[in-house]
Image: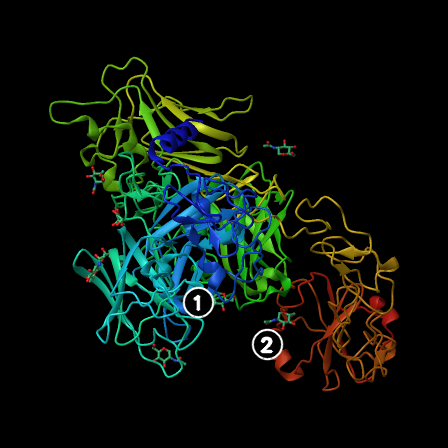
Amino acid sequence: MLIFSILCLLFFMGNTFVLTRGCDTGWFGDKCQYKCHCESTCDISGDCVDNKCSPGWFGYKCQYRDLVHLSKNNINKNRGNIDTKTCIELDSNNDNITLQWDDLYVFTWLRIALGQEISELITDLQILFRRDINKTVSYVPCQNKLFYVIKPQTIDVRCDFNGTFKELVLKGKTIQWICTLNINGGRNVALKQNTTQSGTYTDRSHTEEYSNSSNAVDGKALYSFKEKSCAHPYSGNRKQFWSVKFPHRVVTGYVLYDRQDGAENLNGFKLTASTGNEIQFEYIDEKLKLPKRIYTIPHPHKSPVSNVTIYRDGTLNVCEVEVYGECPPGTWGLNCSQCTAQCPHNCQVDDGSCEILCPGFSNPPFCNQTCDSGWFGDGCKYKCHCEDKCDTSGYCTNNMCSDGWFGYKCQYRDLMYLVSLEANRVIFDNNDDTCITSKPDSIILRWNEAYVFTWLRIVVKNETFITDLKIQFQKNEKQSTQFLACQNQRLYLVDSKTMDIWCDLNDTFHQLTLTGKAILSLCTLNVNGGRNVALKQNTSQSGTYSSARSKEDAAQSSNAVDGKLDAKYFTFKEKSCAHTAVGDKNPFWSVQFLPHLITEYVLYDRRDHKVENLIGFTLTTFPKTDKSFYFKDKNVAVEKKIYRLLDPRKNIVSNVTITRKNYLNICEVEIYGECPTGTWGLACTNCSQDCPNECHVEDGRCVNLCLGFTNPPSCDQPCEKTEYGINCTKHCSDNCTNNECDSQTGECLECSGNGTYSGTCDKRCDNSYWGEFCNESCSLNCANQTCDQETGDCYGGCNEGYKPPDCMELLIKRSEVRCPHQKPTIHGMTDIDITPPVSSKCATPLVTTSSSLLQILHLNVQSYSNKSLELADTITDDSYDIAFLSETWFEKSEMSQEPLS
Ligand SMILES: *[C@@H]1O[C@H](CO)[C@@H](O)[C@H](O)[C@H]1NC(C)=O
Ligand SMILES: *[C@@H]1O[C@H](CO)[C@@H](O)[C@H](O)[C@H]1NC(C)=O
Ligand SMILES: *[C@@H]1O[C@H](CO)[C@@H](O)[C@H](O)[C@H]1NC(C)=O
Ligand SMILES: *[C@@H]1O[C@H](CO)[C@@H](O)[C@H](O)[C@H]1NC(C)=O
Ligand SMILES: *[C@@H]1O[C@H](CO)[C@@H](O)[C@H](O)[C@H]1NC(C)=O
Ligand SMILES: *[C@@H]1O[C@H](CO)[C@@H](O)[C@H](O)[C@H]1NC(C)=O
Ligand SMILES: *[C@@H]1O[C@H](CO)[C@@H](O)[C@H](O)[C@H]1NC(C)=O
Ligand SMILES: *[C@@H]1O[C@H](CO)[C@@H](O)[C@H](O)[C@H]1NC(C)=O
C-alpha cells in the first residue's frame, strides 16, 4: 500500500505530460510529436482505447520498438502486449529462449511479463549475446543486471552490454514463467524534431513541400517522392546533407528509408551522430551494386547524441530517418524527467519509481555499491558456496559447488558431506559424470549425529530405472534398529537423469538405506540439510555491549548472522559475535526472517573466553503454536561450544529469540530450513495456481511424477488395478493373474503361471536356474545342465547315477557300500564320522543335508587320507551327512539309515 501511494505521488510530481487536443489523427503529445502505435486508436493522451499496442510496439503509450517482433523467431503469441495468460511454451528439455536477427542491434533493457508474481528469484535471469550466429563466436553475458518492478507481474531488466548482437539468449529457472517478452529497441527520438538540409529541391512540377527536410521525420517511412514524404536537399553539385536535431538522447540505432520509387539515392551515404560539435559516431555505408531500400545501423556504446546528419556525394533522397534511443541515465518517461533523489541513478522508465532489485549490489535502490566478495544477490544476502567464484547472481563460474553444498546456486547444505560411514566416493564428489560401477544391493549411509530429513536428490546415469528407489531410515546408529519408511513419498523429475524425493519423516535419523535399481547407476546423491535462513537477516538485542576499548559494532546483534564460521571469528576481537549490554535485566537476542519450515538450530559460543556464555540459554520460536519448538538448556557447566537443536516436527518459524539470565554472547546462529509447502525458491515464492499446495523447491514446477497415481500434480487418483508406475502409464504384465499388479512396483499380485517367475512374472530364468526368484540352480547333474523354470526338472534327463526328474538325488545301492571308517576333520564340522575309502573305488565323497543331497565333492582320495578335508564355502549348514561311494549307487531313500560312523 505504501509503495503504491509513493508510486502515485511520483506519478503526479514527475509526469509533466500535457494533454493536447487538435493533433492529426494518429498523433498525440504537447507538440503532437508522438505517433500512435495502438492496435485500434489512441485517445488524446496516447493511451490505447483497447489497451493493445500494434504489432512491433510495446510499453508506455506503445512508444517502444519491440525487437522481439523483428526477430526471426518471434515468440510472443500476443504480439508483444503484456499478457500473463498466454505464455511462452518451452520444450521441457529446452533450458533457454533464443532469438536471432538478420541485422545487428544494441541492448538497453527488456521487459518480461510473468505468469506469477515477481519475486527475488527473477534475478536468476541470465542474458547472453552473440555478434554472429556462428559456432566459433562465443556468448557474452550481460553484466550488472538491475530489475525494475513495473507491476506485480511485470519487470524490466537492464544490464551492461556495449556491443552489438544478432542473437540473444535468456537462461535461468524463471524463463519458464515468461508469458510475454519485449526487447526494447528504443523510441524514435527523431520524429517531428527540427531538421535542416543543404537547400531544398524544386522543379517545375514540384514545390518545396515535396522535398522539405521535415518530410524525413514525418513518421511515414515507406513512401515515394510524389507523396510529399521524402526529404530532398539540393545544393547544386556540392555535397548534400540532411540533419535532425533533438534533445540529448542515448542513441542505439538508426533506420534509413530510401525512396520506394525511382532511382536509389542513399547508397554509399555517410552518417554522423554528435553532441554539439563533438562527433560521437560515424558510419560510412559500403556502396553496394544491389542497393538496399532500408538501412538498419546499430550504434554501439550508447553515447549521448543530439544531432544526426546524413551526407552524400551527388543526389540525396531520404524518405524517413528513424533514430532509436533512450532517455539518458537518471531520467525517465517520454520527456526524460529527472529521477528523484530516492534513486537518482536508476529509476523505472515508465513512472520514475524506485522499486528496484539489484543483485550484486548491497544498497538498493541506489545500487551503486557492490557486494563484498563471497556474497551475492539482492542486498548481498546470499553466501557464495561455489568451488571457484560466484557471479553477481550466484552462479558458479566453473559450475561446481564447494564441498558440503549443492543445488540451486549451491544454497542447500549437503548432509552427504557429513556422513561418517564412508560411502562410495563417486556419489558425493559433486561430479555427475562419475557413477557407481559396482552393483551394490544397497547403499547405507550413517551419521555420527542425528539429522532431520526433508528431501534428497539423485543423479543417475541410466534413466530407465530412476524411479526404482526405496528409501528407509533408522533412528539409531545400530544396524539392528527398526527401519522407518519414506512416508508420503513425492517425486520431482528435475531433468531426465535427476530426481528429488521427499519423505514425511517426522523423527530424526542416523542412518539411511537406499535400495532399488536406481542405485546401480547412481552418479550423485545429495541429502538436503536445508538452507541457512538466518543469514544476514534482521536482528536485534536487548542492548549492546560497549566499553572504552570496544565500540558497539564489535558486539552488535547482526554479528551473529554474518556467516563467518571460521573458528577465528568465534573470538570477541574479530567483531563477529553479538554481545548484550552489561547490566541488562532480561537480555535477549533475536532474528526475524521469512516464514520457513525449520529443521535445525546451531548456536556457536565464543572460544576465546573460559566462561561459558551460553549455558542455560532458552531458545523460543515464533509464531507460537501448541507444538512450537522451544528449548531450554540444562544449566550444567559442561564445556560445549556448539549447540545443535533439532526440530523433526519442522515447525514454521519466522522469529527466533534467545534469552539468558545474565548476558548473552553469541558468535553465530545458523537456522536451517526449507520454504513452507506451497512455496519455492530462495525467497519462498508461492507455487502457481496449477499446484498451489506443492511445487518443486528450485523452480516452482508442479509435481510431474505420481508413482501409483494418475494425475500430477495432485497425485490422488490411484491407478486402475491393471496399471502401475509413474502416472499409471504402464500396464501390468499379461503374466499377472487378471493383469493385476502393485500400482507402484508393477509386481504381480499373483503369477498367472505361464512358466514365468519373479515379481512381475515376466522373467524367464537363465537356462541353468529355476524357481520363483530364479535363484535355484538346475542340478549339476542335468544332462545338459538346463531345467524347467517352474519345477527344476532337467531337460534331457540326468547324468548317470542321478534320479530323474530333477537329478538332484543319487541312486544309491546299500549293498555295495564298502568303505572302511576313518575320521577326517572337516571345516566347520567336528562331530561327524566319515568312512574313508579302502580302495580307489571309494572315489567320490557325497555331502548331503539331512533332508536333501546338496553337493558332490570331488575328492582326491589319496590326499584325503593325509589331509583334512575343506568343504566349499557355500556349504554352511551344520547338519551334514557325508558318505563315500563306490562306483555303484545307492537308493537315497535308504541313505538315512546307512550307518556312517
Ligand atoms: C539453447 O537451447 C538449445 C536447444 O536445447 C541448445 O541447442 C543451445 O545450445 C542452447 N543455447 C545456450 C546458449 O545454452
Ligand atoms: C564465423 O565467425 C568467424 C569470426 O567472426 C569467421 O571468421 C568465420 O568465417 C565465420 N564462419 C562462418 C561459417 O560463418
Ligand atoms: C560500457 O561502456 C561504458 C562507457 O564507455 C563503460 O563505462 C562500461 O564499463 C562498459 N560496459 C561494459 C560491460 O563493457
Ligand atoms: C525547432 O525549431 C523551432 C522553430 O524554428 C524552434 O522554435 C525550436 O526551438 C527548435 N527546437 C529545437 C529543439 O531546436
Ligand atoms: C549537426 O552536426 C553537424 C556536424 O557535427 C553540423 O554540421 C550541423 O550543423 C549540426 N546541425 C544542427 C542543426 O545543429
Ligand atoms: C551511491 O549513490 C549515492 C546517491 O547518489 C551517493 O550518495 C553515494 O556516494 C554513492 N555510493 C557509491 C559507493 O558510489
Ligand atoms: C539402461 O538400462 C536398460 C535396461 O537395462 C538398457 O536397456 C539400456 O540400454 C540402458 N541405457 C543406457 C544408456 O545404458
Ligand atoms: C509421526 O507421524 C505419524 C503419522 O502421522 C504419527 O503417528 C507419529 O506420532 C508421528 N511421530 C512423531 C515423533 O511426531
Mark 1–mark 2 Cα distance, whole angstroms, equals 120 Å
243, 146: nearer the viewer: 243
Residue annotated with mark 1: 226
Q: In which quarter of the image is ligand 8?
A: top right
Which of the colour schemes (rainbow, by chain, secondary structure, one colour) is used? rainbow
622, 34: nearer the viewer: 34
Task: Find residue 874 and report its horizontal and vertical position in percent.
Answer: 65, 68
On screen, residue 29 versus residue 553, left or right, reads: right
> How many numbered markers are drawn?
2
The crowding category of the residue bearing disc 2, from other C-alpha atoms within 10 Å (few below 14, some 14 to 19, many at least 20), is few
Location of the C terminus by quadrant is bottom right
Residue 444 visible, this orientation: yes
Upstream in sequence: badge 1 or badge 2: 1
Residue annotated with mark 2: 867
Could you tell me which secondary element the residue under label 2 belongs to? loop
Mark 2 is on which residue type? Lys
Image height check: is 371 above or below 325?
above
Image height check: is 807 above or below 5?
below
Q: Which residue is painted at 52% across and 62% down in the image?
A: 74
